[in-house]
Amino acid sequence: MARTQVAIIGAGPSGLLLSQLLHLNGIDSVVLERQSREYVAGRIRAGVLEHGTVELLLEARLGERMLRERLVHDGVALGFSGRSLRIDLHALTGRSVSVYGQTEVTKDLIDARIAAGAKLVYEASDVAIEGFDTSHPKVRYRHEGRTHELDCDFIAGCDGYHGVCRQTVPPGAMRNFERIYPFGWLGILADVPPVSHELIYSNHARGFALCSMRSPTRSRYYVQCGLDEKVEAWPDERFWDELKLRLPEEVAASMVTGPSIEKSIAPLRSFVVEPLRFGQLFLVGDAAHIVPPTGAKGLNLAAADVRVLYRGLVDFYRTGSARALERYSEICLRRIWKAVRFSWWFTSIMHKFSDDPFAHRLQLAELDYLSGSTAALTSLAENYVGLPFEAAS
Ligand code: FAD
Ligand code: PHB
């Protein structure tokens, strides 16, 4: 039977980054992924990296292309009441954020893992975890028509919201917290120059809109849409028209449009499971928590979990002490809940929840308050760029 120190389920950013950091510290892992490599590498998701995530990617020796190609943003804009409020993140916090897509992060991680001869199994089906409440956990899976068994010391459940790891935990051993929002985001990717060199989050009576980007020649735009909407009902022309209607006029006037190269709808959800550790099983990233994308926190939170877990594992294998691992849940959950709160708050002031004019007036009052208060702006800015990491011991 095959054996490894850490069995990692899922080759999204969490699983790949964890295996890379463990490898650099002499710890062996096997990564099992349900999808094909092409499928994982092609998913369009997050775009904004906090300073701390960039530092962690550098620690994982992945930084070269990222440092060359990322766009450093010192500010971000909020659109409302026909105007645009620029928030100077750098002046308020001393920090910036980086625009570097999850697709690129994943590509860099896959390249680094393969160059290091990693054990990465794509298209592993029927993954099942066993005995994680004993000191001899085991993973079973099927690959290329055969059943395999993998013995390990620890299992890292990096398999996303729909993954198998969380689902294997007995319901009585965990508590779920969830909020479903009554809308989704319709996003497109297009090879047109971004309308602004910084992101614009726009509150509008027709619904929220976001102008983002992947490079100086590739834009990523979103509009809030109904949960029952279908991508097919949104030909490019309708998307561009709706986007422009939801932006301050001078922004809409300079918008360059073009054919979309990707178009998809994502529902918005907040979800947290407690705790994150069950014996030798650790839940990491989207397997443990989901935030609405408004705060750009999903990928960054996943990286923060990986940071705590890999350091705990390194400590364990170097010194035999499990102290840091024992604090994994507690340390991660403190950051997670703050990100859940920020993402919920930012979502609630920027989106249209109903036709209630009272609710819209309250949002505008909050945005107006922000524009006149350095204290309120600093609170937004320090959450957006990423709260400081907490020491594990
Ligand atoms: P994932 O990226 O979900 O990776 C989990 C991996 O596990 C997947 O590759 C999956 O195929 C694999 N897997 C699942 N089940 C199994 C199994 N049984 N066996 C083996 N492998 C399995 N965040 C932002 O900050 N901004 C955004 O704009 C944004 N947009 C998003 C849009 C969508 C549609 C989604 C789903 C998420 C978005 N996010 C966004 C969130 C961000 O992409 C995630 O937080 C991030 O991908 C988390 O990484 P992860 O590795 O924990 O999980
Ligand atoms: C993106 O570029 O996809 C993006 C940026 C910021 C967000 C969400 C998504 O808050």
Image: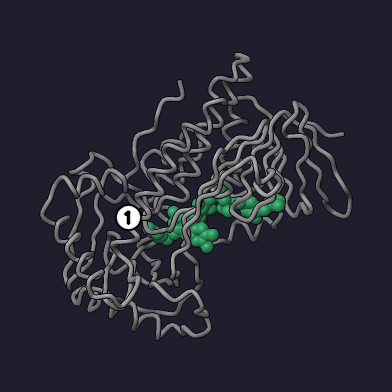
Instruction: Tell me which image quadrant ligand 2 sits in.
Output: bottom left
- Left or right: where 329 falls relative to 377: right
Q: Is residue 29 above or below residue 120?
A: above
* Residue at image point 52% right, 27% down: 327
Q: Position of residue 114 (x, y in %)?
A: 66, 43
Please tell me which residue lies in front, 281 or 10: 281
Q: Position of residue 144 (x, y in %)?
A: 85, 54
- Residue 337 visible in the current orientation: yes
Pointer 1 residue? 345
- Left or right: where 56 falls relative to 29: left
For the residue labelled by badge 1, is the local secondary structure a helix, a strand or a loop? Answer: helix
* Residue at image point 72% right, 28% down: 153
Name the residue at the left extreme.
372
Q: Where is residue 187 in the image (x, y as percent from the top left)?
A: 44, 70
Coloring scheme of the render? one colour
Q: How many marks?
A: 1
Q: Is residue 238 above or below residue 56?
A: below
- Left or right: where 2 falls relative to 309: right
Considering the image in quadrants, where does the C terminus appear?
A: top left
Please tell me which residue lies in front, 174 or 11: 174
Confirm or reject: label 1 Cβ below 8 Å from ligand 2: no
Q: Residues within 10 Å of mark 1 (few under 14, many from 20)?
A: some
- Residue 104 visible in the current orientation: no
Considering the image in quadrants, where does the N terminus appear?
A: top right
Please tell me which residue lies in front, 297 or 330: 330
* Residue at image point 41% right, 41% down: 54
Q: Position of residue 8 (x, y in %)?
A: 67, 40
The amino acid type, in three-letter code, at marker 1 is Trp
Please tell me which residue lies in front, 248 or 163: 163
Name the residue at the top extreme.
319
Q: In this view, does 333 lie above or below 230?
A: above
